[in-house]
Image (spheres, grey):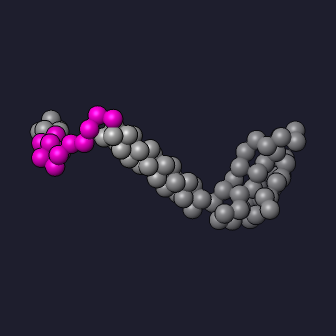
Amino acid sequence: MPQIAPISDLRNYGQVLEKVEEGKPVYLTKNGHGEYSLHDIADDEALDKARAMVRLMSELNQGFSSGEEKGWLTDEEVYARLKEKRRKV
């Protein structure tokens, strides 16, 4: 169950921070509406990894679709393109 606290509880921020645990953020409300969240840094790292995985899967799906539509490259063509890119760097 999520921890919800009014933003005014930040006056005693030490008590609010004690409630924050990995996988259990504290949501702060302002005038009864969600405004902020406080979460453990490990949750932030996990979110970054998840975003990177989604981006990787998206790129792979785009490549697969491109291969299906435009045709696949041979191993030699891939090697030549990578070699050319390495020269440009």
- Span shown in magenta: 69-82
Does residue 77 show up? yes
Could you tell me which residue is drawn at 76 percent across and 41 percent down? 35
Looking at the rendering, in which quadrant would you find the N terminus? bottom right
Q: Which of 53 and 57 is in front in this view?
A: 57
Where on the picture, by quarter, is residue 40? bottom right
Where on the picture, by quarter, is residue 66? top left
Could you tell me which residue is drawn at 36 percent across and 44 percent down? 64
The dominant secondary structure in magenta is: helix
In the shown orientation, is residue 48 left or right of residue 88? right
Q: Which of 3 and 69 is in front in this view?
A: 69
Residue 27 location (% of width, % of height): 76, 51
Q: Count how many numbered circles sit on residues in the image.
A: 0
Q: Which of 25 and 10 is in front in this view?
A: 25
Looking at the rendering, in which quadrant would you find the C terminus? top left
Residue 58 location (% of width, % of height): 44, 44
Does residue 52 show up? no
In the shown orientation, is residue 70 left or right of residue 57? left
- Residue 33 drawn above or below residue 44: above
- Residue 1 drawn above or below residue 63: below
Residue 62 location (% of width, % of height): 39, 40
Is residue 62 located in the magenta-colored stretch of the structure? no
Could you tell me which residue is drawn at 31 percent across and 40 percent down? 67
- Residue 87 drawn above or below residue 23: above
- Residue 55 drawn above or below residue 66: below
